Image (tube, rainbow, N blue to C red):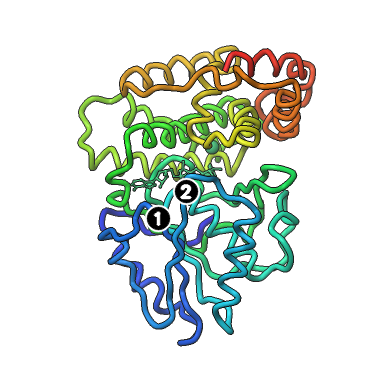
Amino acid sequence: MVPRVVFGRGSFDQLEEILTPKRESTKSPFVFLLDDVFKGSSLEHRIPLSGSDRIIYINSLIEPKTSQVDAIRDQIKNSSEVLPSGIIGIGGGTVMDLSKAVALMLTNPGSSENYQGWDLVKHRAVFHVGVPTISGTGAEVSRTTVLTGPEKKLGINSDFTTFDQVVLDPDLTVGVPLDQWFYTGMDCYIHCVESLTGTYLNAFSQSYGEKAQELCDEVFLGNSLSDEVMRDKLMMASWHGGMSIAYSQVGVAHAMSYGLSYLLGTRHGVGNCIVFNQLEEFYPEGVRQFRKMVDKHGVEIPTAVCANLSEDDFNTIINVSMGMVPLWENALGKDWKDIITPQKLRGMYEKM
Ligand code: NAD
Ligand code: ZN
């Protein structure tokens, strides 16, 4: 679990107070990974830089890659004689994941692709802090960092991955475009549905999942909330949804959306929406509510993304998806392969 967290509008300004005692020496900088959407913004000017601290801008249009993590790690190591005092990620799930991965790779040898999997990390990461600026993925709270490597899209799952400190300031999510707000918010809603209907469900995942789902219902189907309160609630929903899947697992939508993302580069939030929209068979009530949310907010969910795929493409996408064993097992139980065959998946993808 994340050991330290602050929550509240304006809490970003506590960053200096949080970081100062963590500085290892005057030579050891804090490195801020900042979503480049904030380049030149008032938020950038509020970053408490001192000494040799610096900012590395991250373009979130592409989801994190192992090669990118390795390159940022090398850039940081080459520019300073000593390890940084900390890595601070300010942005969405993309920046959260990159920050966690870079912090890990500063203390673990070799390429990040060698650590994609479960509990392969040997050494504690450098101190790392997450400051989300969009709500939904739960990446701020999870023990994974999802990376696309040369062979697979898979997280570095370990106890060392989790942030040491998180700053939850809902004001930072002002300005997220409507579509993106919805797609990333739906990631949270889908986490809840997949966790609460899964076979891995337990008392912890249930209590976090129910709270997150209740908050999502208020945010996406309620009528009387102010924008400020909606931002507060969605940030809390993201946290609770992330905690719910930390104690259980995601399901069919994520297993299939990983395939889309690997082959077509489809981003996580919208990919989940494309898939979830076609999953009445598995999540009838969840999909019914989801469609109400789509209608209420007038957001378009892309269709026909698999219309022009070749045989090879279908084989790739199906293989990636079928490789997500724990997700299928959570969704459908140990005998999931009796239900999910390559032919069945092909038919499902063809509808997307
Ligand atoms: P994102 O980080 O990819 O950002 C989406 C877009 O929103 C970007 O263009 C970004 O610049 C913009 N943006 C972010 N904050 C903004 C703001 N305040 N104002 C204006 N624009 C803003 O989006 P995401 O959906 O949060 O993250 C997706 C990533 O998270 C994927 O890489 C996915 O694999 C990962 N993920 C990780 C976990 C985990 O547990 N580690 C869980 C789910 C998803
Ligand atoms: Zn997700």
Relative placement, left or right, of 249 versus 226 is right
Q: Which secondary structure lies at badge 1? A: helix
261 is higher (above) or lower (below) than 70: above
Indicate which disc, 2 or 1, sits on the residue closer to the N terminus.
1
Farthest-out residue, bottom: 26
Disc 2, disc 1: CB below 8 Å? yes
In the image, the residue with mark 2 has its CB under 8 Å from the nearest atom of ligand 1: yes
351 is higher (above) or lower (below) than 336: above
Which amino acid is tagged 2? Answer: Ser
- The residue carrying pointer 2 sits among few (fewer than 14), some (14 to 19) or many (20 or more) residues within 10 Å by Cα, namely some
Q: Which secondary structure lies at badge 2? A: loop
Tag on residue 60?
2
> Which residue does the image show at 43% across and 31% down from the upper left?
213
Ligand 2, what quadrant? top right
In the image, the residue with mark 1 has its CB under 8 Å from the nearest atom of ligand 1: yes
Tag on residue 213?
none
Residue 148 is situated, as x and y percent measured from the top left of the image, at 64, 46
- Which residue position holds label 1? 36
Relative placement, left or right, of 299 versus 86 is left
Q: Determine the image quadrant of residue 256.
A: top right
Q: Determine the image quadrant of residue 339.
A: top right
Which amino acid is tagged 1? Answer: Asp
Task: Please name whichever residue, 204 or 291, is drawn nearer the observer in this view of the structure.
Answer: 291
Task: Please name whichever residue, 36 or 249, is drawn nearer the observer in this view of the structure.
Answer: 36
> Which residue does the image show at 63% across and 34% down from the upper left?
258
Q: Determine the image quadrant of residue 216.
A: top left
Classify the position of the N terminus by image quarter.
Answer: bottom right
> Which residue does the image show at 30% across and 42% down from the upper left?
231
Mark 2 → mark 1, Cα distance in angstroms = 8 Å
Residue 287 is situated, as x and y percent measured from the top left of the image, at 48, 17
